Amino acid sequence: MNNSMSNKNCFAFILIFAGAYFSLAQVPGTLPIDSDKETPTLKSDEGSQVSVITRFVDNPEIGKPCTMEITLKNLGTLPLEELILSQEWKTKPEILEVSPKPLIQENKWTWEIPELQPGTGKIFQFKILAIEKDNLNFKPAVAYKVATLKKNTEKKDGLLVQVQGPQWVRRGQRAVFEIVVANLGLIPAENVTIRDKLPQGLRHPEGELIEATLGDIPAGQTKSIRLETLAVENGKFSQNIQVASNNGEKKLYQSDISVSDGQINLQWKKSWEDTAKGELEMILEAKIDSIKTGNIQLAVQTLIPEGLEIIGSNPQARYESTSSANKLLVWNSPQITGGKWSAKLRLKAAKPGDWQLNAKASMENSADTSSMFLVRIEGTSEIQGGFAPNTIKTNLGSENEIRFVLKNNGSIDLKNNSVRFLFPDGIVPLAWNGPTIAGLDGQNLNFDDLPVLASRADKIYSVNLKGLSPGEFRVVVEYGVGNIKRSTACSILIAPLP
């Protein structure tokens, strides 16, 4: 329920910014608030004090569900009106639960709070799947209007209306609303009346126009009524509520509600990911709350963007052509078990990047629902090393060159690759060459780490050596990054002198 009118003469606009406030004539800003910290008390000349607390309900960890919480408090002596709490994410998280529900626009979440009385607060809690570190850094900002006292106070009431009720209800069930009227003025509000015009989707024994008299409301007090209706028709509707007093202006409020035989909760989940291959498995799940108990006609579709290859789906989906290189997968009338349906999709990325998966579900006599998931492939690293050739036949006393090739067959650059030659007794290195400087330590030849080995690139290391005695010898090379090492060997067959 949004307040469609505001008393422009009785409020000053305040926006928190770095511990200060700005009036309506000044440039607005935002205050970043660190997680797990309470902001200093923010005080304005009008007598408002606002506190915002952010905290993690459980231990934050990337790749696991994390519950986060924002607490907004009015510590001042004046009511706050038309508050706007916003949270802008650097990277979109995967939403699991959020209460109350915000308005989501791209990376920004926005909550609208009609009013916050002195000494009261409101908690906003949301559960997300942290895809990366940025998802665990939430910094909300808040803007609001502060009730101020005019020197020449007019004898008008300061009515504020709040309506609490469902945004969706199943046809045949009750939709219960509580209409709360607060008097924020300095004088009593006389003979306050409420007129609620119900839409065609809701029914009440008294008809479509409900009228109630609250009587006088003293300054600083509230009164409320409970309105119980029956959802009788599917669709999206708006109900108009008018509140008026004998000594104040009329105010009109509007709230929206959806009525349907069922509701679909559609959600993406990541099952597993193989970063080395650039592959991942996604689960698309639909939970259905329906008035029907028999065959439910469900249709689900998802658009796989260009750059992602579909390895397989279970259950099998039907492919439909699109005007672009995107691929549309459709499941018509899939089997539903226990009010749930799910499909597994195995995807592979041709190169590193970000892709957005969009899915949509529809059902007869139910509002369509959608779900979005951002797929990020950081890239694959496939390091390989080998000798060319890997066997050398020579005679005692001869000098020979061995060549080792380090390759990056992956899609991302590799950094700080190490290469070390290990020579057996009987083999002496005479000279060497490579992309970095090397030094001999006993029977080991250590090359300095290679800073960067680009994707699909290779580097050659060569060593001139000489055998001191006949026989079969193995020169081993260890290569890799950090503690992850691989090894390969070159066989040296030295024949004796005739």
Image: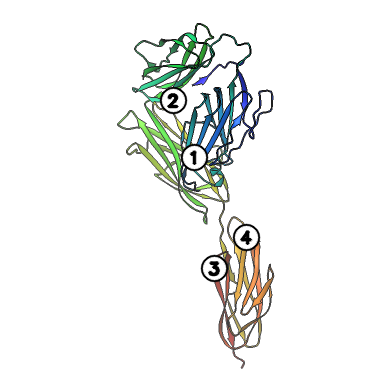
Q: CA distance from mark 3 to mark 4?
A: 16 Å
Element type at marker 1?
strand
Q: Which residue is mark 1?
A: 68
- Left or right placement of residue 290 versus residue 453 in this view: left
Residue for badge 3: 486
Query: Is the residue under label 4 in contact with that under label 1 (CB below 8 Å)?
Result: no
Give the amino acid at mark 4. Answer: Lys
Q: Amino acid at mark 3?
A: Arg
Q: Residue furthest bottom?
A: 498
Residue positioned 59% across, 55% down in the render: 411
Residue 415 is tagged as: 4
Residue to which mark 2 is pinned: 167
Using a 10 Å C-alpha cutoff, classify the residue at mark 2 as few (fewer than 14 neighbours), some (14 to 19) or many (20 or more). Answer: few
Mark 1 or mark 2, which is nearer the start of the sequence? 1
Q: Secondary structure at mark 3?
A: strand
Which one is earlier in the sequence, the residue at label 3 or at label 4? 4
Where residue 63 appears, as percent x and y from the top left, is 49, 48
